[in-house]
Structure formats: structure tokens, C-alpha cells
Image (cartoon, rainbow, N blue to C red):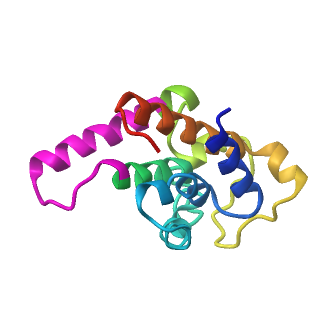
């Protein structure tokens, strides 16, 4: 486990959602202050507002990729290149974890879509793969940055 991966896991364990934990370890080096990053990523926990859609760790990784690689241009070519990166990151996560969909990753675990977050207890952490998924997303993105010769 990398230092960033461990820090992201600690952010998650301290109460930040999965998306916030991933974006949180990259945001400042990529030009976004921590508080703003936490606000931006706040809607993506639990598979987007606990709807169990795209895993929040993956969304956090995609947000970090946007900060690292995307441009504000409306160029179709630049968008296409960026979407290619996003698809590659999704592929790597899926290869490692079987899916990028929260409800599939939580299969066999009670995964309510209630808007009320589950209480973070010892049992919560033992049953859910979320802490490990946070670490996986950070490590996948770190490796991708390294391959792209981007240092953060």
C-alpha cells in the first residue's frame, strides 16, 4: 500500500465518503483546495448519493483524472482523448474488482439506497469492501499517473 492509499483509507475511516477519500489525497497537488474538493465529491458517495450506481471511489478517481489531464477546451479531440483515459481507468478497476458498480461490489452486503448513511461501526468496516476499494482506486490512479509521467 502506498502512502496516499493509506491516507485515503484513513480519510474514509474518519467519516469522509469513498469519493471524497480518493479525491482528497490528490486534490491539492492537482490545484484544488481540500475543502472545495470535499464539497465537489460529497454527492458521489455510496454510488452517487447512495443510489449504488458507479462506485464512489471510481468517481473520485475520475475527478482526480479530470484535474490531472482534462482541459477546459470544447475540442472534440481533447474530450475523446480524456474519455479514453477514463475508460482505461475504469477497465483497470473492473479487472481488479469485477465491476465499477457499487451495488455489484456490495453484493451479499445489505446495501440500502436510503439517503441516510450507514453508521460507521466495526461491523460496517468488516462487512464492506469499501476501505479496500478506496485503496485500490488510489493505487490504480497513482500507477496511471506514473505511466503518464505526471508527478503528484
**Furthest-right residue in view?**
122
Q: Which image quarter holds the N terminus?
A: top right
Image-quadrant location for residue 108: top right
Q: Residue at x 68, y 60 (%)?
A: 112
The part of the chain drawn in magenta is: 68-92
Whether 73 is among the magenta residues is: yes
Q: Residue at x 47, y 53 (%)?
A: 59
Residue 61 horizontal side relative to residue 72, left or right:
right
Q: Residue at x 65, y 50 (%)?
A: 8
Measured from the top left, where is residue 30 in percent x and y?
A: 42, 55
5 above or below 79? above
Image-quadrant location for residue 133: top right
Q: Nearer the viewer, residue 67 or 12?
A: 67
Measured from the top left, where is residue 2 in percent x and y?
A: 64, 35
Q: Main secondary structure of the magenta part?
A: helix
Q: Nearer the viewer, residue 140 or 148?
A: 148
Q: Nearer the viewer, residue 43 or 140?
A: 140
51 above or below 61? below
Whether 37 is among the magenta residues is: no
Measured from the top left, where is residue 143 in percent x and y?
A: 48, 31
Measured from the top left, where is residue 47 in percent x and y?
A: 55, 56
Residue 15 horizontal side relative to residue 152, left or right:
right
Q: How many marks?
A: 0
Q: Nearer the viewer, residue 73 or 134?
A: 73
Amino acid at each position: 500500500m502506498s502512502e496516499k492509499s493509506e491516507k485515503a483509507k484513513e480519510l474514509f475511516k474518519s467519516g469522509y465518503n469513498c469519493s471524497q477519500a480518493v479525491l482528497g489525497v490528490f486534490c491539492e497537488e492537482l490545484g484544488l483546495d481540500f475543502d472545495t474538493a470535499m464539497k465537489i465529491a460529497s454527492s458521489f458517495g455510496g454510488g452517487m448519493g447512495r443510489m449504488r450506481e458507479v462506485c464512489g471511489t471510481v468517481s473520485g478517481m475520475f475527478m482526480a483524472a479530470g484535474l490531472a489531464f482534462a482541459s477546459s477546451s470544447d475540442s472534440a479531440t481533447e474530450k475523446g482523448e480524456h474519455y479514453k483515459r477514463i475508460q482505461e481507468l475504469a477497465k483497470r478497476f473492473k479487472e481488479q474488482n469485477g465491476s465499477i458498480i457499487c451495488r455489484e461490489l456490495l453484493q451479499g452486503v445489505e446495501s440500502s439506497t436510503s439517503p441516510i448513511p450507514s453508521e460507521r461501526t466495526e461491523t460496517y468496516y468488516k462487512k464492506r469492501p469499501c476501505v479496500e476499494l478506496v485503496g485500490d482506486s488510489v493505487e490504480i490512479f497513482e500507477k496511471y499517473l506514473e505511466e503518464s509521467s505526471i508527478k503528484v
